[in-house]
Image (cartoon, rainbow, N blue to C red):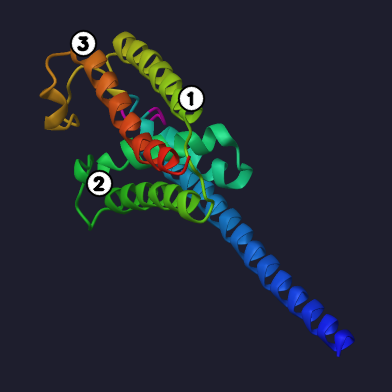
Amino acid sequence: ISIVSVLVASASLVAVNSVWLTKRSLSLHLRMAIGFVTVISWLAYNLYYLHPENFNWSVSLPLYLCDLTGAIAGYSLISNNRRCRALLYFWGLCLTTQSFIFPIGDQNPYHIHYWIFWVMHGLIFACALFDLFEGRFRPQMADLVTATKCSLLYGLVIFSINTIFGWNYGFLGISSHTTPEIITMFGPWPYRVPILLGVSILQQSLLLLPWRAFSQTNI
């Protein structure tokens, strides 16, 4: 009887381990698939706008925060790089999702601009959710520090480029027809730029609070 029990127990462990490995393998394959689809979509998205027929120096370069987040989203799932995952969490869930509330560009569903805008932003959001729930990403204070430094660096670089060329990438330049009305509510340019950066960092900080509170209750 003891031998039978050992055999049954061993078979059960093998079965459970096989199921776990299968689930892990499926999760990894799905992660890689979403990552590569996002990278390919990002390349197609930018190649479309860089095409001579569509190109405009003031709007076509991949200098918007969502453009950078799109590249980071796909790469973070493929590489599992911690810093990229941190940016995906804070930029993808906090900043890029604001495009769902204040979309820019041609919002006519009969135009291709509409679809590539929503597909790209939808993929960024999907990558962030996948890494949060399936990838089990849990942000730490160090991740917020990484996102804050990158946000400030982005703001400094893009503000300088906008100032030199008169563009409005990241909405950190002089107001144009593409500037959402809510941006102008923060005051005239360039005085609103540090306010916008401060608000964005505050929003990202709020995304860390639930995890800090959760970790405190489990001490």
> Is residue 75 magenta-colored?
no
Task: Confirm whether residue 51 shows in the render.
Answer: no
Q: Spot the residue most to the front.
A: 2
Quarter residue 92 falls in:
top left
Q: Residue at x 46, y 28 (%)?
A: 141
On screen, residue 51 versus residue 9, left or right, reads: left
Reading the image, the residue beneath label 2 is 100
Q: Residue at x 26, y 41 (%)?
A: 99
Helix, strand or loop at mark 1? helix
Lower sequence index among marks 3 and 1: 1
- Circle 3: residue type: Pro
**Considering the image in quadrants, where does the N terminus appear?**
bottom right
Task: Confirm whether residue 153 shows in the render.
Answer: yes
**Label 1 packing within 10 angstroms: few (<14), some (14-19), many (20+):** some
Quarter residue 198 falls in:
top left
Position of residue 10 relative to residue 136, above or below, is below
Reading the image, the residue beneath label 3 is 190
Residue 151 percent location from the top left of the image: 39, 23
Q: Which mark is residue 146?
A: 1
Q: Main secondary structure of the magenta part?
A: loop
Residue 125 percent location from the top left of the image: 38, 49
Q: Nearer the viewer, residue 211 or 163?
A: 211
Q: Are marks 3 and 1 in contact (CB under 8 Å)?
A: no
- For the record, the magenta segment spans 59-63
On screen, residue 108 versus residue 50, left or right, reads: left
**Label 3 packing within 10 angstroms: few (<14), some (14-19), many (20+):** some
